[in-house]
Image (cartoon, rainbow, N blue to C red):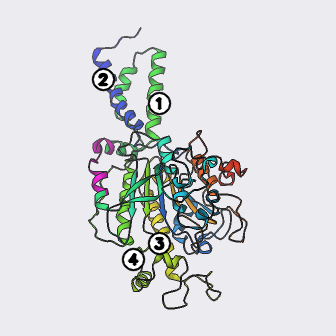
Amino acid sequence: MSHHSRRRILQGLGGLAMALPWLELFENEAWAQTSPTRPRRVIVVTYQMGIPVAMWKPSAVGNTFTLPYVTAPLEPFKSRCLFVSDLDNAMLSEGGSSFEFGHPGKSEAALTGTLTTGAFPTTNTNSVSEIRSDLTTNGGANAESIEQRIGTSLFAAHPFASVDLGIDGDRGQGKVPSRFCFESRATAVSLECNPTTAFNRLFANVTPGNMQAEQALRELKARNKSVLDAVRGEFGDLRKGLGADDQRRLDEHAARIRTIELTTVPPPTCARPTGINALTMPRMDQATPPQVKILAQAMACNLAPVGRLEFANQQSPRFGIASLDNTLNANTTSYDWHAMVHGDPLPGTTQFLRPGRDANATTFDTRLLDGYRFFVQQFAALLGELDSFPEGQGTTVLDNSLVILATDFGEGLGHYHAKMGYVLAGNLGAAKKGFHFRAGAANANFYTASQFNVSQLLNSVLDMAGVVGGPEFGLKGFLAKRAAPRRIDGLFV
């Protein structure tokens, strides 16, 4: 049996004690492990009024394509995105023509895969068999939205359940109910449209972490050393004189500490974002940057597992695009963004800003396309912010996040549920990236049913997030009724 002096044992244990706090930090949720197999958070960005399909959809199926004008702002992130086009939200047909062709129910269905509460009896299990014969389009969605399911299934122990922000762009500041995101049946998420209020709520208790400890570890790693290198003498003293078995156990313990430490890096110091100023009746281009900054920093600080950013004004927002806003401002009593998207002629003229209403209008007016492009630009800005925060070994917050851009229907000319487009970015689990998946046949008629639908996409998103088990997402029994597969296998590697 080996013998050590009291001093030698204490010195050796002191070395161990120096290493153990780092292990505690490594286990902390704020320090990401390398190459996660599933996302650590989910973020959704939503806006209403659909897409201009021809100017939104990538040029070709697969991984060799160009992005048209509306989605071109995503070019820097193209290799980290999955574009899904020509999806039908066929589930809406279960509610009949009022859901198929009108505004009500469209945004509520885009992330929930179900109808509104007015389609069901008060007590129900959200099943296709329970849809009322005298249904209405009243109420919010009849179930939670996809990001809520992911958040509650995978994550816990955050300061907040979610970060919920809105952009109005016309009606001022305050809270508005989401049209897309629901915590549960008929319970819409409340969106904070005031950046100052959101900032004060989220970051009131955020202070920098142990900056001295973080800096010490960074300096060691910069020299490609571990914390153990700093206490090598103490470990050596403890090892001397030990029996072979004890030496082996001590060496294995030290090796485990070194492996964990050298393959893990601390996140950026969690900080309060700066430049968040009070705004009064801001345009969307003024309100969006601070909201994007708040959301990205909150995700980097791991304040919540779910983030939401919704452009909440479908009727008459202001974009900060002079030609577009001037047109809207000149016709405030008879013309708005809603009318422009749907193809109404400019007041007092026969000038149409999009094809579809008149045979002489064969192209999209730049004013309309710039409005659509605006939302994609803000999504790209959020991806850029998330990508600016290191998190893990050679990865960023974006690499560890599943980020979704969604709208409420397809071609903005009408309200029909066909040919919708989604963009998924960041950590998509086993799904393809740098890829365009077309859910329908090439050059199919707008009203020709696509092979795949939104319900299948939402179930696919659950698989991307690593959520396993549980009931079919969305309207229960719908996919079985259609004899449709639960997910879209073509989205996965």
Residue 24's place in the image compared with 102, above or below, is above
Q: Secondary structure at mark 3?
A: helix
Q: Mark 3, mark 2: which one is toward the viewer?
A: 3
Q: Mark 1, mark 3: which one is toward the viewer?
A: 3
Residue 485 seen: no
Q: Which residue is mark 4?
A: 320
Q: CA distance from mark 3 to mark 2?
A: 62 Å
The stretch in magenta equals: 198-214
Task: Name which residue lies at 44% across and 34% down.
Answer: 258
Which amino acid lies under the numbered mark 4 shown in the image of this protein? Answer: Gly
Q: Which residue is mark 3?
A: 374
Labels in figure, total: 4
Query: Given contact means CB atoms under 8 Å apart, are the residues at marks 2 and 1 in contact?
Result: no
Please rate how many residues cluster around mark 3, counting C-alpha atoms within 10 Å: few if below 14, some from 14 to 19, many from 20. Answer: some
Magenta stretch containing residue 211, yes or no? yes
Sequence-wise first label, 1 or 3: 1
Q: Which residue is mark 2?
A: 11
Toward which corner of the image does residue 70 lie, by quadrant? Answer: bottom right
Sequence-wise first label, 3 or 2: 2
Given residues 4 and 129, the one toward you in this image is: 129
In this view, the residue farthest toward the bottom is 349
Given residues 32 and 280, the one toward you in this image is: 280
Please rate how many residues cluster around mark 4, counting C-alpha atoms within 10 Å: few if below 14, some from 14 to 19, many from 20. Answer: some
Q: Mark 4, mark 1: which one is toward the viewer?
A: 4
Which amino acid lies under the numbered mark 1 shown in the image of this protein? Answer: Ala
Q: CA distance from mark 2 to mark 1?
A: 19 Å
Given residues 281 and 260, the one toward you in this image is: 281
Determine which of the numbered discs, if any, sits on residue 45 in the image.
none
Sequence-wise first label, 4 or 2: 2
Q: Which residue is mark 1?
A: 255
Sequence-wise first label, 4 or 1: 1
